[in-house]
Image: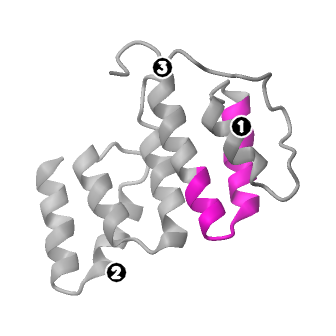
Amino acid sequence: GLSLRQFLWAFDATGRTVTAQSLFKRTRGKPIGRDAYGELLRIAAPKDQASILEEMASHCRPAGLRAAVLNAAVARCLEVGEEDHANEILHTMAQEELWTPVTYALAKRLSRHAVDGNPPFPGLLDPGPGAH
């Protein structure tokens, strides 16, 4: 939560970003709160941000929110040239029926333009209960 965010910020502010990132690795699989995720995204290298977003998405209950966070992870992968990682996320989203119109737009940006198991367009339109 907020205190963890402050802890991460303090490590980064004192030049101990590596310590903050190692703390994140130790907390994998546990929800750490949106403020802490936000702080991790701020201090992380661009190539590491997709993994942080995937971890964050794993703790999102509403389907629409999970889809939005995973779409952000795909966008980050495409931005840093990690098309294989983007394809893996898109495949997971297809298995979980989380594709949205945004997901289709992101998938078109892949050089191979095909993701195994992509659902029929337009995909998920209802964000699900508790998404707002």
- Picture residue at 11% right of the left edge, 54% below the top: 3
Numbered disc in front, either 3 or 2: 3
Question: Is 33 on the left-hand or right-hand side of 84?
Answer: left
Residue of label 1: 104
Crowd around label 3: few <14 · some 14–19 · many ≥20 (10 Å): some
Asked if residue 33 shows in the view, the reply is: no
Point out residue 128 in the picture as x, y percentages from the top left corner. 46, 15
Q: For residue 127, which numbered disc appears in the image?
A: 3
Q: Earlier in the sequence, mark 3 or mark 1?
A: 1
Q: Residues within 10 Å of mark 2 (few under 14, many from 20)?
A: few
Mark 2 vs mark 1, CA separation in Å: 35 Å
Mark 3 or 2, nearer chain start? 2
- Magenta stretch: dominant secondary structure: helix
Give the residue at x 64% y 30%.
Answer: 101
Q: What is the spatial separation of the Cα atoms under label 3 and label 2, in whole angstroms?
A: 36 Å
Helix, strand or loop at label 3? It is loop
- Magenta includes 6? no
x and y, in percent, of residue 87 in the image: 75, 51
Residue type of the residue flagged with mark 1 = Tyr
**Which of the two labelled residues, at mark 2 and mark 1, occupies the earlier sequence position?**
2
SS type, badge 1:
helix
- For label 2, the residue is 18
Cβ–Cβ under 8 Å for marks 3 and 1 = no
Measured along the vertical axis of the image, is residue 42 above or below residue 86?
below
Q: CA distance from mark 3 to mark 1?
A: 16 Å
Q: Would residue 13 be visible to someone looking at this image?
A: yes
State left or right for residue 78 relative to residue 21: right
Which residue is at a point 68% across and 22% down the rendered structure image? 123
Which stretch appears magenta? 74-94
Q: Quadrant of residue 80?
A: bottom right
Q: Position of residue 113 (x, y in %)?
A: 85, 49
